[in-house]
Amino acid sequence: MTIISDPLFYALALPAVVALGLSKGGFAGAGQMATPMLALVMPPLEAAAILLPIMMAQDAAALWVYRKDWNGLILATTLPGALIGVGAAWVLAAHISDAAVRVLIGVTTICFVLYYWIGPKRVARESGKPGVTGGVAAGAMSGFTSTLCQAGGPPFQMYVLAQKLTKMNFVGTTAFFFATVNALKVIPYFALGQFSTKGMGTSLALLPLAMATNMLGFWVVRITPQELFYKITMVLMFVISIELVRSGMTDILRG
């Protein structure tokens, strides 16, 4: 089994995978920094494809834990939109450069950070309680951004927060939605040629760390001031995203 050997890749991949594990363990949103970090040293969609098998393994664990806590009506409303969003991202990614994808990832992540700083509950409250059309739109935006940069959380969260679900129902519905979206993404990633033997080998090599930090997340949540953790994470994401936009725009202008 061959794996990526670049030390710089692992210098970024290890904290990225830890962030994914902590996200699934309880620090929801921390995992949004994983793809932007890897996109600093490799094509963005290739980075997303390496992380996808890891996320799917974590999804399987989450589905088992929350198998009784989910809202079927919300999933029936948002998943058709997600299918549209994944397809739109597939079409777009096939026709734009890696530099343009880096810019899109950077801008999307900056929007996510601003969304966090404004406050998801405030955004959900001010946007009102959306209906079926809002659910399809939220699913489409979430599927689109998730496919490009694994950052589909904000559109979905804004829609679901307005439904005022119980905590467990909210977490379970979110787990089922993104497990489905991640499974859908296998098709465009495969069609775009983003999966490789070396990439899959690297995913398998990183998987034990991801699952270990997934469990670690439950413990870290109990002992770490969550607000401080998020502030540090969001600042890092903001800085990384600015660099992605800068490098992407530089390559586009040179071209």
Image: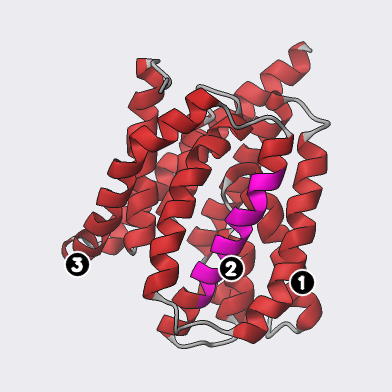
Q: Are marks 1 and 2 in contact (CB under 8 Å)?
A: no
Viewer-side residue, 135 vs 235: 135
For the record, the magenta segment spans 173-187
Q: Which mark is residue 177?
A: 2
Depth check: give the residue in front, 2 or 9: 2
Among the 4 quarters of the image, the one containing residue 105: top right
What kind of residue is marked 3?
Answer: Arg
Amino acid of disc 2:
Phe
Residue at mark 3 to residue at mark 1: CA–CA distance: 35 Å
Q: Residues within 10 Å of mark 2 (few under 14, many from 20)?
A: many
Farthest residue toward the left?
A: 223
Q: State if disc 1 and disc 3 touch (CB < 8 Å).
A: no
Up the image or down, 140 lies above or below 74; here it is above
Is residue 127 visible to us here?
no
Q: SS for tag 1?
A: helix
Marks 2 and 3: in contact by CB < 8 Å? no
Residue 154 location (% of width, % of height): 58, 62
Q: Which residue is mark 3?
A: 222
- State yes or no: residue 13 in magenta: no
Q: Residue 38 at what x, y percent from top left?
A: 48, 31
Location of residue 42 in the rendering, given as x and y in whole percent from the top left corner: 54, 23
Which mark's residue is nearer the viewer, 3 or 2? 2
Which tag, 3 or 1, sits closer to the chain's start? 1
When the figure is inspected, residue 103 is found, relative to residue 180, above or below; the finding is above
Which secondary structure dominates the residues rendered in magenta? helix
Q: Is residue 243 left or right of residue 6?
A: right
Where does label 1 land, which residue?
136
Q: Residue at x 72, y 33 (%)?
A: 192
What amino acid does circle 1 point to? Answer: Val
Q: Counting residues from the N terminus, which is met first, the one under dot 3 or under dot 2?
A: 2
Does residue 132 sit above or below 205 in this rendering?
Answer: below
Q: Residue at x 62, y 68 (%)?
A: 156
